[in-house]
Image (cartoon, helix red, strand yellow):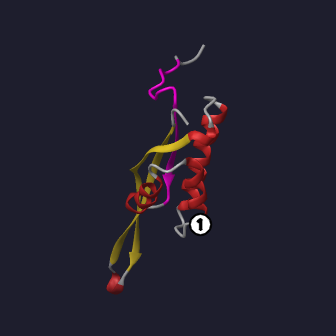
Amino acid sequence: MGKQARPRTLKDNEVSATVRNLRTSPRKLNLVAGFIRGMKAEDAIAQLGFMNRRIAVDVKKLLESAVANAENNHDLDVDNLYVAEASVGKAIVMKRWHARARGRGARVLKPFSRMTVVLREREGE
């Protein structure tokens, strides 16, 4: 016995991967997400390997995980995959304080993000 299986929300030629609590702001992460939207999966992985942004390493791991899901769980052709969606959202915000002059404190916000990537298999190639 266990929980009932959830019905699949994606189509048969789609696969997704999600990462939660990435230690960067959603605004910075969305720049990387916008860069890979619409690219072929293997081209996006190659481009992220050469990107100078720190968060590109985590996005590359997420994309490789989505490709592995497509290959192992859904039997999709890896060569025909492209990034159909790359969405970014807000997660928790750690609130810290920083000591300032004359006994005061300044608020420091440390935002976290979440990201979901949906890969789709191109038809007819």
Relative placement, left or right, of 40 versus 38 is right
Q: Which quarter of the picture shows residue 111?
A: bottom left
The one nearer the camera, 106 or 125, is 125
Q: Which quarter of the picture shows residue 49?
A: bottom right
Q: Indicate the position of residue 41 as horizontal and vertical percent values.
A: 56, 48
Quadrant (top left, top right, bottom left, bottom right) of the N terminus: top right
Note whether 30 is above or below 81 in the view shown. Answer: below
Residue shown at 36% from the left, 82% from the top: 100
Note whether 122 is above or below 25 in the view shown. Answer: above
Residue shown at 52% from the left, 30% from the top: 13
The one nearer the camera, 117 or 4, is 117
Relative placement, left or right, of 42 versus 20 is right
Inspect the image, locate mark 1, and give the three-letter code of the amino acid beneath it.
Answer: Phe
Residue shown at 51% from the left, 37% from the top: 122
Q: Which residue is mark 1?
A: 50
Residue at the outermost bottom position: 102
> Tag 1's secondary structure?
helix
Bounds of the magenta segment:
5-23
Q: How many marks?
A: 1
Q: Indicate the position of residue 33 as horizontal and vertical percent values.
A: 44, 55
In reply to whether residue 25 is colored magenta, the answer given is no
In reply to whether residue 20 is colored magenta, the answer given is yes
Q: Which quarter of the picture shows residue 74?
A: top right
Q: Indicate the position of residue 115 as horizontal and vertical percent values.
A: 46, 48
Residue at the outermost right position: 72
